[in-house]
Amino acid sequence: MKLKKYLIMALATATVFSSFQACRPKGASDAVSGNAAEKAYVAPGKYDEFYNFVSGGFSGQLAVYGLPSGRLLRVIPVFSVDPEKGWGYSEETKAMLETSHGNVPWDDSHHVQLSKTDGLYDGKWAFINANNTPRIARIDLTTYRTVEILELPNSAGNHSSPFITENTEYTVAGTRFSVPAEGESGDVPINTYKKNFRGTLSFVSVNKDNGNMDLAFQIETPGVNYDLSRAGKGVSHGWFFFSTYNTEQANTLLEVNASKNDKDFILAVNWKKAEEYLKAGKGKKLTGLKYAHNKYDEKTHTSKSEFKTETVVLTAEELEGLCYYIPCPKSPHGVDVDPTGEYIVGSGKLAALIPVFSFDKIQKAIEEKQFEGDFGGIPVIKYEAALYGEVEKPGLGPLHTEFDGKGNAITSFFVSSELVKWNIKDLKVLDRVPTYYSTGHLMVPGGDTKAPYGKYVVAYNKITKDRFLPTGPELSQSAQIFDISGDKMQLILDFPTIGEPHHAQAIRADEIKDKSLKIYPLEENQHPYVTKGEKEARVERKGNQVHVYLTSIRSHFAPDNIEGIFLGDEIYFHVTNIEQDWDMPHGFAVKGANNGELLVMPGETQTLKWVPDRIGVFPFYCTDFCSALHQEMQGYIRISKPGNNVPLTYSLGTNIPEDSTN
Ligand code: RUQ
Ligand code: CUA
């Protein structure tokens, strides 16, 4: 009987929501007009105006595009192994993917945040979240390399992350999936969600000078889904806002059961207050945890993994003034804060309006205790008391909002497939453009800073049917760039993206391009297996471990003939690229290796481990076309039968056949 009721409900909801499915706007082919192409055209040899960092969705990586051309400049491996660059395959990078679950070679990255000072991008680092096995990564914007990954305990589905505060004091991580406690006490029936499942909001501090992350504290809250978040800025600096859904606290068929409440919440967190409570000793130390903290050292070119066991937890419902819920219509997704910090925009996925909250009114409501009871022991501010106003009939399925710096907001609509521009002060809709289609995130360069650059808005679309040449069952994802310098948004270009594009940010190229690292100085290389010149190239045996100290320079390896290695040996090729020229990587690969390649930057050392599975002579070669004689950049290693009398020898240019003088 119960099941039948559920099925009927599910069916009813399915029909309702099928009308909420993406709809494809009309007139796809004639949307580009006039001088549009000119606006996106960046002539050959000319640089783009912006770097666009786009989270790679289920590829787990971070993609870098130029704007306005949409040219893909680089894919930075973060949470997923990348055999193209040896990420997760070289001995040096394996520790970066270490977690409490062991080595995890993949994740799902949704949001990217550029570090900020005074609410503006400072061009030092990019942060990106791992959704599945909760982690935050930091990427160095001089090397475009992932240099740190921190795992988050007591967390699941790290989606509302890694949003950062105005001076990068903290990057946060909120539980999308509430879960019971870690360890044996978490062995509870799933349908005890209401009683046993909790949400955790992690605040990770970032060292101003070196960027190092540390889990500063966690706030434990009632169990709901925390979807997205944004820091306050300007007037609201010191606060953080998290959107929630599933305030129904359902544990099954969420599609129906988490869509019942007319309103869910935005959680407002006073993190300055949290700091006070911590100082006053109100944090509870939780021990017996295990979470990984991985760092890449640019001097030794090696990563290390450290396991931590403790965290400090503040319990939201026990600490007055720390957290407040604000009702927000219909399963909000994005929560976005305008450049002044005064206006907080909630986007209910199933709502037909956009509520805009006022920070000032929120503060007054708290002072005057304008509450409508509590949720799980946390005061709920009256909707009207926090509300600045509503944008009426903006479109269907609002997801995210960015700001143009001229007093306007632009919101993406998944269901009605459009971008809609509206004025923050009078909440009037000013313009709308169709997208192709079902836009998720959108991005205005600098759109979440105190001073957006404006100029463009990019829509990152979930569905692309009929937009690009078909490529089998899955079509390319797409981004679309619109010029917003005039009153009307104008489509100027479509470009395909990797993974599924999610959140993105863009920084003016001239703010960071000259800081890009060109080489790793060889004299500073402190790798334990570095070879600083060909004279030091050698092969050393330690038991059944063989360490090959190999150098690469145009266009040979030293040594390139190696003998005296036996089946059963473990071989470590420590390749040092002794070039000191920009853009001169050398690759390294050996036949039959159950491994990726190495791609070694000038001045860097990287190691490929190889356990041969058979006897014979195996070629190795450079994989990156580095000179006219790149095809000559090769060598041989001989694997002999154990017990055969083959002395260990290695050489370059001297292992000549005896009869070669004939
Ligand atoms: S999400 S499409 Cu940020 Cu994962 Cu909104
Ligand atoms: Cu070195 Cu090709």
Image (tube, rainbow, N blue to C red):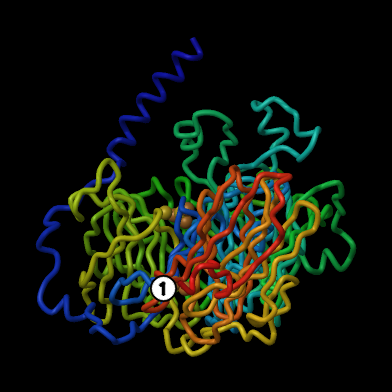
Question: Which element type, helix, strand or loop, lies under badge 1?
Answer: helix
The residue tagged 1 is 630
| Quarter holding ligand 1 | bottom left
Left or right of 110 in this view: 654: right
Which amino acid does the dot numbered 1 rest on? His
Label 1 Cα crowd, 10 Å radius (few <14 / some 14-19 / many 20+)? some
- Residue 82 visible, this orientation: no
Taking the spot 23% from the left edge, 72% from the top edge, the residue there is 489
Taking the spot 43% from the left edge, 80% from the top edge, the residue there is 452
Closer to us: 639 or 600? 639
Q: Where does residue 537 sit, x and y in percent of width and height?
A: 67, 75
Q: Where does residue 302 sit, x and y in percent of width and height?
A: 69, 68
- Residue 66 visible, this orientation: yes
Left or right of 630 in this view: 177: right
Q: Where does residue 92 sit, x and y in percent of width and height?
A: 66, 63
299 to 459, vertically: above or below: below
Q: Is label 1's Cβ within 8 Å of ligand 2? A: yes
- Count of numbered labels shown in the rendering: 1
617 to 232, vertically: above or below: above
458 to 319, vertically: above or below: below
Closer to us: 347 or 482? 482
Taking the spot 36% from the left edge, 78% from the top edge, the residue there is 628
Instruction: In the displayed orientation, state which residue is furthest to the top.
Output: 1
Taking the spot 75% from the left edge, 71% from the top edge, the residue there is 528
Left or right of 78 in this view: 75: left
Quarter of the image with the C terminus is bottom left
Q: Where does residue 629 sit, x and y in percent of width and height?
A: 39, 76
Instruction: In the displayed orientation, state which residue is furthest to the front.
Output: 662
The quarter of the picture where residue 147 lies is bottom right
Closer to us: 333 or 636? 636
